[in-house]
Amino acid sequence: MKRYRNGEIWDFEHEKIAVGGAFIRENSIFNVNKMTHSGRKVILGIDGGTTSTVCVCMPLIPFTQPLPDPLPVLARAVAGCSNHNSVGESAARDTLEQVMADALTKAASTRSAVQAVCLSVAGVNHPTDQDRILNWLREIFPSHVRLFVQNDAVAALASGTMGKLHGCVLIASTGTIAYGFTEDGREAWAAGAGPILGDWGSGYGIAAQALTAVIRAHDGRGPQTSLTLGILHKLNLSSPDELIGWTYADPSWARIAALVPVVVSSAEAGDLVANKILHDAVQELSSSVKAVVQRLDLCGEDGKDYFPLVMVGGVLDANKRWDIGNEVMNCISKDFPGVRPIRPKVEPAVGAALLAWNFLMRECHQEPLTSYYS
């Protein structure tokens, strides 16, 4: 097999030898009961985002069988950011390659056993992005491996629809995006352009507005707010002036977004500034979903047709009394009463693996036995 520039990452494939029912690597015997069979065919699903990257290794489930519940996961590996817009293309590729190798190592498998890879990563917004990543993946995997590249929002949708691409997903974590598919394959998205271009319903957007409100209150341009004490306490700072140095010392998106719980707590305590920030976020997130639904006509001519809305991300999690996700659903259902909210039971990386399974099945001209709402 061709050795890629990071060939040492895959050295475990050459070190592993099967002897008498045990695997031996560098004179260390591994417990065979914790290992998979060397000939088992597997699928890799990767969810690569701004905060972290997760890869799962799953066995290839026969297409003639329904998907089991729970879904079998042989191994799971986690790494850092793989969004090339955040860390650069070289670092993003290194992260993705390492997390795939780690997952296969944990599953006692190799690239030769892989049948399909679905890489769903943030920053893939154009066919040229897909082609560039596909060309790189072809250098890593054997020619028999089927390769699929998607935006990370697609894996999030699939995590709620069991691999079927239909409906809309709303992601609201460090960043935000709404992404939708029709059953005939049309797709559309809204937001997802990053903080500079206005992902204001995201965790970054909420926290950045809170920091701005503290500075405005401090210099007299805005109303006083309990966000000041909350954020200063969270960051162990003594004055709003120190926020300037803290912010620009490392203005990474995830670091700023980590302040969202302070905003929620302040809003629950009745702070008007914090409540306005969260209400504005609800409107922003709702408008992203509505834009996608209308462009794809997911709601039908009368606006009442059923469609699934998969909701993913820490911003949409139940936050005590101030439940952002619930408020977003209330806002959307006023215009689209047929919307059905889905909170995924599996993580997006498993959704990516299910996508790979469905893509393979489609290529074999077989229809899935499970529906997206099962």
Image (cartoon, grey):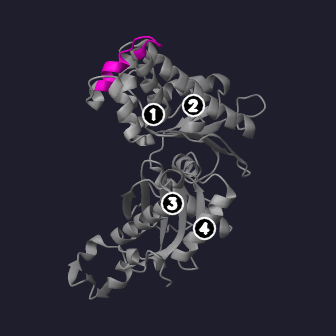
Q: Residue type at mark 1? A: Val
User: Which residue matches tag 1?
Assistant: 315
Task: Label 2: state its secondary structure.
Answer: helix
**Residue bearing mark 2:** 285
Q: Which is in the foreground here, disc 3 or disc 2?
A: 2
Amino acid marked by disc 2: Leu
Q: CA distance from mark 3 to mark 2?
A: 27 Å
Could you say where residue 60 lies in the image, as x and y percent from the top left? 49, 69
Q: Magenta segment range?
A: 219-232
Label 3 SS:
helix
Residue sitting farthest toward the bottom? 19
Mark 3 and mark 2 lie on one chain; the one further toward the N terminus is 2
Query: Is disc 4 placed on a helix, strand or loop?
Result: helix
Q: CA distance from mark 3 to mark 4?
A: 16 Å
Left/right placement of residue 349 relative to residue 139 reads: left
Q: Which residue is mark 4?
A: 134
Task: Kindly identify which residue carries mark 3.
Answer: 353
Q: At 54% across and 37% down in the image, what residue appears?
A: 195
Tag 3 near tag 1, CB within 8 Å: no
Give whichever of discs 4 and 2 has the lower sequence position: 4
Neighbor class of circle 1 (other Cα within 10 Å; few <14, some 14-19, many 20+) is many
At which x and y percent is residue 268? 38, 17
Q: Residue at 21% of width from left, 80% of height from top?
A: 29
Q: Is residue 31 magenta?
A: no
CA neighbours of label 3 inside 10 A, class few (<14), some (14 to 19), many (20+): many
Q: Is residue 220 magenta?
A: yes
Q: Pointer 2: residues within 10 angstroms few (<14), some, or many (20+)?
A: many
Task: Tell me how far mark 2 sits from mark 1, CA to CA.
Answer: 10 Å
Q: Amino acid at mark 3?
A: Ala
Which quarter of the figure has residue 128? bottom right
**Residue neighbourhood size for the residue with mark 4, other residues' Cα within 10 Å, grouped as few (<14), some (14–19), many (≥20):** some
